[in-house]
Amino acid sequence: MKLLFLAIVLLQALLVHGRSSWYKNVEWDVLIFTQQWPITSCISHLSHNPHSSCNIFPNMTSWTVHGIWPTKLGTIGPNYCNKTWHFHEAEIMPIEKYLIKYWGNIFAEDPMTSLWQHEWVKHGTCAAQLPSLNSEEKYFGKGLDWVTHYDYVAVLGHANIYPDDVNAYTREQIFTAIKDMFGVNPHVDCIYNKKTKVHELYQIKICFDHSLHVVDCDGIKDKELAENQGSCPKDGIIYPASVKAAGKEYSYPRALVDLHKKYWDESQATCVTWMCHALMTIFSLIWITL
């Protein structure tokens, strides 16, 4: 029995040492925290896969996490820092119902866990060199912390930027709304819709240093990056309010933005943890179909 116990302790020690040893040559400057607008993601997905569907009916009522990406300025990555550190759903079960809402897989034909598995293996194993992110629960929990604290529905709403299928915004309006609220330069990314021939607001990125303090995103690189402020054009940006998929129409009402603003303002004054932020909104923001 004692030999078995010693063997288990030794195996755990070797595993920890093996994981940590991967990070000796891993260097990155910032964590890119990327949120996506689910409606734009769904529109883009359907344009490439007309017979597919999306998981946004009716659960997702906010911007959702795409990922937390350790990045060296001027390049992309590092990625896949420990291919032996596999994703295990059991480790995130305590927070999974919140991940479905705030870090959910939008593509309906893919397994629910596919996005989480991809993000952990590609990016999480690199971020895990930080003690505050060195497990699945910590990594994904930090995403929940940030997505509820940096609520872009509320922040853009405060700048009078509402989801709208007709009226367009400028890149400067969106960029300034985020910068004025959080004091750093974000990146604002768009996707060009070939059917409607407009650029649609897709992702907003903010960055964090090794101490998890928010910093400017200046210098990050993206394959679609055209300008220092992101991949969106200077004007004519649509922040889409609706999408049709699988016989359903998902429309985002202005009233829901105003609710986000109200509860986010209240949570900023009273909440410390992501759980508090989430609970103040998750039971209050009920989907409204127009």
Image (cartoon, rainbow, N blue to C red):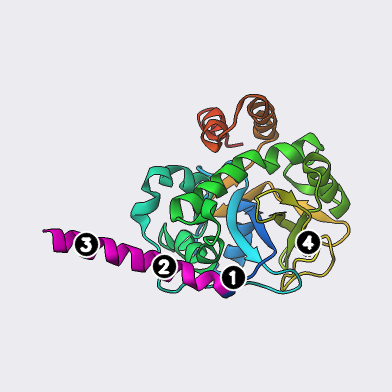
Task: Please name the residue shown 58% across and 58% down the image.
Answer: 67
Q: Which residue in the structure is indicated by mark 2?
A: 17
Q: Which residue in the structure is indicated by mark 3?
A: 6
In primary-sequence order, the first of circles 3 and 1 is 3
Viewer-side label of 2, 3: 3
Q: What separation in Å lies between label 4 and label 2 (alpha carbons)?
A: 51 Å
Q: Identity of the amino acid at label 2? A: His
Q: Identity of the amino acid at label 3? A: Leu
Task: Please name the residue shown 40% across and 61% down the image.
Answer: 111
Q: What separation in Å lies between label 4 and label 3 (alpha carbons)?
A: 63 Å
Q: Identity of the amino acid at label 4? A: Val
Q: Evaluate if marks 4 and 2 touch, with contact meaning CB atoms under 8 Å apart.
A: no
Circle 1 — which element? helix
In primary-sequence order, the first of circles 1 and 4 is 1
Q: Which percent across, then down, holds residue 53?
A: 50, 59
Viewer-side label of 1, 2: 2
Viewer-side label of 3, 1: 3
Q: Which residue in the structure is indicated by mark 4?
A: 198
In primary-sequence order, the first of circles 4 and 2 is 2
Answer few, some or many: residues within 10 Å of disc 1's Cα (few below 14, many 20 plus, some between 14 and 19): few
User: In this rendering, does residue 247 appear at all?
Assistant: no
Magenta span includes 250: no
In primary-sequence order, the first of circles 1 and 2 is 2
